[in-house]
Amino acid sequence: MVQDEDGNEHRTWRPVSAVCRCGASAVKPWCDGTHKVLRKRTT
């Protein structure tokens, strides 16, 4: 179980779980790989 900054608890049943950092995941707070199809940032 993971607790977010608002104190909400999120359960996961996956052996490995990645938290979304790009903000585009459809299954937040978990990463669904959406970042792989997003345009890459330019600096």
Image: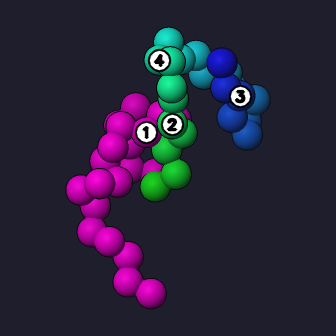
Identify the amino acid type marked 1.
Cys
Q: Earlier in the sequence, mark 3 or mark 4?
A: 3
CA neighbours of label 4 inside 10 A, class few (<14), some (14 to 19), many (20+): few
| Location of the N terminus (image quadrant) | top right
Q: Amino acid under label 2?
A: Ala
* Residue denoted by label 2: 18
Between the C-alphas of marks 1 and 2, the distance is: 5 Å
Which residue is depicted at the point 46% across and 51% down? 23
Q: Residue at point 38% right, 42% down?
A: 25
Dominant SS of magenta comes to loop
Who is closer to the viewer here, 9 or 35? 35
Q: Is residue 30 magenta?
A: yes
Whole-number angstrom distance, CA of label 3 to CA of label 2? 13 Å
Q: How is the image coloured?
A: rainbow
Tag nearer the camera, 3 or 1: 1
Q: In front here: 13 or 23?
A: 13
Say which of marks 3 and 4 sits in front: 4
Picture coordinates of residue 32 (x, y %)?
Answer: 36, 37
As drawn, the label of residue 3 is 3
Q: Are marks 1 and 2 in contact (CB under 8 Å)?
A: yes
For marks 3 and 4, give the CA distance: 16 Å
Looking at the rendering, the stretch of residues picked out in magenta corresponds to 23-43
Provide the residue designation for mark 4: 14
Alpha carbon separation for disc pair 2 and 4: 10 Å
